[in-house]
Image (cartoon, helix red, strand yellow):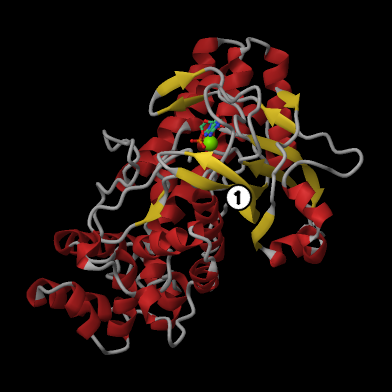
Amino acid sequence: MAIPWQGAPAPDPRVLVLDEQLAAELGLDPAWLRSPDGVQLLLGRSVPAGAAPVAQAYAGHQFGGFSPRLGDGRALLLGELVDAHGRLRDLHLKGSGRTPFARGGDGLAAVGPMLREHLVSRAVHAMGIPTTRSLAVVATGRTVQRETPLPGAVLARVAASHLRVGSFQYARATGDLDLLRRLADHAISRHHPGAARAPQPYLALFEAVLAAQASLVARWMLVGFVHGVMNTDNTTISGETIDYGPCAFLDAYDPSTVYSSIDHGGRYAYGNQPAVAQWNLARLAEALLPLLHEDEDEAVRLATEALGTFPERYRGAWAEGVRAKLGLAARPDREDPSAPGGPAAVTALAEELLELLAVHRADFTSSFRALAAAARGDAAPVHRLLPDPGAVDAWLARWRALEPDAAGMDRVNPVYVPRNHLVEEALTAATEGDTAPFLRMLEVVSAPFDERPGLERYAAPAPEDFGAYRTFCGT
Ligand code: AMP
Ligand code: MG
């Protein structure tokens, strides 16, 4: 399932950004990574003795259509590292040149999209959401031809692994049951070791992936993250967010929001993400069927039953998260299911709030920080975002009666997310050679919950004239 390969040469490599903390976590010396030898590693040109970089094969459903052979078309798995916590981590490159899986592609990546992945994955990580990380972005000095000529770059990505739903689809499609079993055993030992002790380890593996994905997508929804291209090859077995292409954070709250320029049907709209995750898990279940039971009808029954638990798991994770967002996290006196502050009542209250946000197209991120101000006694920011005093004050009165914890809200509601208009501004400057705005913004989103003076512009909603934002895949 992998082909030995190496990165393409870069005429004039230059490190644009390096996550020094992540480097340290991986036991890599940041100063060395910036040296000529370190840069050759970050380009996949020279690797430590014993390492054998490969391009991996995988399949996947893209926008619902199955491609039996995708694979790392412009990526390279350099190898595995043991991090400071003793965990195995993949070090992987993106934009490192054509591989045998490149199909028509040039194997390259441009500075803008790679810096975008670095920035957005940093923000997602800083919010405590499981994600692949970006160790570095190296400009190659080579021009990449897109709609216009652009400066090229290579991103070094760190992941718990690169096992995807599409990896299982690939193994299943080969018809080699032994390969499928070895892949499942590997996934169990690497990511879900508890499954090995279950009476039906492969069913337990499926359930563990389902639980990880239900929790992940709930976390995305709670911060307004739109992944944008939830194909099965972009759905991990580890439960980490992967593949920051057309992703973006919501500005105005609207569940039908789509940013990706190619998502004409809105398949990967913000509000569809839980349903899409369940659909992707159904594809994983199909791939695993021969391992679930020798009788196919029984295998289907087991898979269907497990898949049916997704909505409940997702709702549970979301409900717990939204309670924290409203400052009403679980407390002994809130446990009574029929209490006004009980779980069901708070979920209903949250849903009413979301309806208000949708009606007013209120800025999603700002709204929750404004609510914390209201919990402290200043309702003016909420009134500015939701200019409908009747409905809003009635809602606020019911909510305040439950004694929301404003400090607790500020610990889970980010004040700084990578706002689309600022991301564009920073990436445009970086593409033109000035990385200063990008580096400043990176610092801001690295501490998303700590409001700091002087950073008001990073917390402000998009200007009215920003319009419908569009993002692009595979660039
Ligand atoms: P993605 O949208 O990044 O998940 O990519 C989907 C598939 O297209 C993967 O197999 C990628 O390796 C491949 N791909 C994307 N861009 C390129 C490119 N410029 N050259 C070669 N392959 C690419
Ligand atoms: Mg991908």
Numbered label tally: 1
Which of the two residues, 446 or 206, is positioned nearer the viewer here? 446
Q: Residue at x 53, y 17 (%)?
A: 68
- Left or right: where 158 falls relative to 310: right
Q: Where residue 181 appears, x then y in whole percent?
A: 70, 21
Q: Where residue 326 appears, x then y in whole percent?
A: 35, 71
On the question of residue 316 being in view, the answer is: no
Residue designated by label 1: 132
- Which residue is situated farthest in the left direction here? 390
Which of the two residues, 384 or 394, is positioned nearer the viewer here? 384
Compared with 110, 414 (above or below) is: below
Q: Residue at x 53, y 41 (%)?
A: 144
Compared with 430, 188 (above or below) is: above
> Could you say which quadrant of the image residue 162 lies in?
top right
Q: Residue at x 44, y 38 (%)?
A: 230
Residue type pointed to by label 1: Thr
- Which residue is situated farthest in the right direction here? 49
The secondary structure type at the circle numbered 1 is: loop
Q: Residue at x 57, y 45 (%)?
A: 239
Query: Quick one: quadrant of the N terminus?
Result: top right
On the question of residue 376 being in view, the answer is: yes
Q: Where residue 221 appears, x then y in whole percent?
A: 38, 54
